[in-house]
Amino acid sequence: MKRIIIAVLVITGLACSRTDTLQTLVDARWIDLTHSFEENTIYWPTNKPFSKDTVFYGLTDKGYFYASFIYSAEEHGGTHFDAPLHFGHPGSPTVEQIPLEQLMGPGVVVDVSEKALEDRDYLVSVADFLAWEDSHGQIPDGSIILLRTGYGQFWPDPLAYTGTSLQGDEAVAHLRFPGLGPEAAQWLVDNRNIHLIGIDTPSIDRGQSVYFKAHRILCAAEISICENVANLDKLPESGSFIIALPMKIKGGSGAPLRIVAML
């Protein structure tokens, strides 16, 4: 009889837990962290920009409405995902090889906007991560770190957002926006266990980077990257849950990304 009572209590507890979890999802507030893809979407200056054309739009000869479009885009532009292959090595994981569990986790928003808006070349440092931990405790295992530089407010103005309105090879030397310092990237790899890292600029490396060391450090450790993330000003520094789902491109080094936060 005692075993039956214990079993009933366990089953009842599991049922309540499932109900609570489902209700949490139903009641949650969701924040879209993705910029729309359109003709004004910002891409790296040497990349082919997003384009969309009409295949058909209107009434068919049978009298019903139908719409269809065709688009083209490079992997790395707009709100997008960098798989480890992007700056790793030939055997690094590609987009479709990233486990779903690594595409979601507790949100850690590190706000460096005050410093970054005063210095377009600002590098997020180890001290910035330690300051976050002083307020919120150690960065949880499996976290998705989002770096808020404040530059998301300038989207989609290429001059204000990237530092230049030029396009092509000549634009690259004029790019000016903040990024993650290589020392801080290495500190995360060595000392914390995170799933992803994202930023509200075109690149995890600052605009004036030549060797893309932050990319290389993170990709070598098989940590994927999200770039051009939107609406980070709408998130708390802790307490959110992030889901980042890239287009599942087989063999891709990156992909357009839909990333959302649950509050």
Image: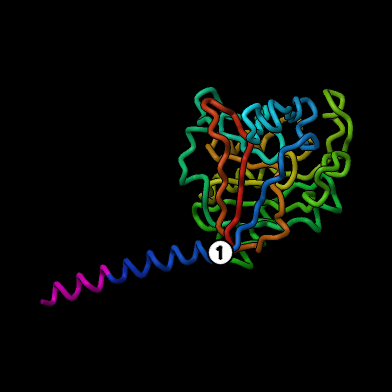
| Magenta span includes 2 | yes
Which secondary structure is most common in the magenta stretch?
A: helix
Amino acid carrying label 1: it is Ala
Residue 90 image offset from top left, x and y in percent: 53, 22
User: In terms of image quadrants, where is residue 73?
Assistant: top right
Give the labeled residue for mark 1.
Answer: 28
Residue 48 image offset from top left, x and y in percent: 75, 25
From this view, report whether residue 208 is shown above or below residue 200: above
**Residues in magenta, as a range:** 1-11
Q: Quadrant of the N terminus?
A: bottom left
From this view, report whether residue 156 is shown above or below residue 115: above
Q: Secondary structure at mark 1?
A: loop
User: In terms of image quadrants, where is residue 82?
Assistant: top right
Q: Nearer the viewer, residue 47 or 203?
A: 47
Residue 148 horizontal side relative to residue 153, left or right: left
| Residue plotted at (38% across, 64% down) | 18
| Residue plotted at (70% across, 55% down) | 232
Residue 223 horizontal side relative to residue 158, left or right: left
| Residue plotted at (15% across, 72% down) | 4
Going by the picture, which residue comes out furthest to the left?
Answer: 1
Q: Quadrant of the C terminus?
A: bottom right
Residue 249 horizontal side relative to residue 68, left or right: left
| Magenta span includes 176 | no
From this view, report whether residue 116 is shown above or below residue 212: below
Residue 153 image offset from top left, x and y in percent: 81, 52
| Label 1 crowd (10 A; few <14 / some 14-19 / many >=20) | few
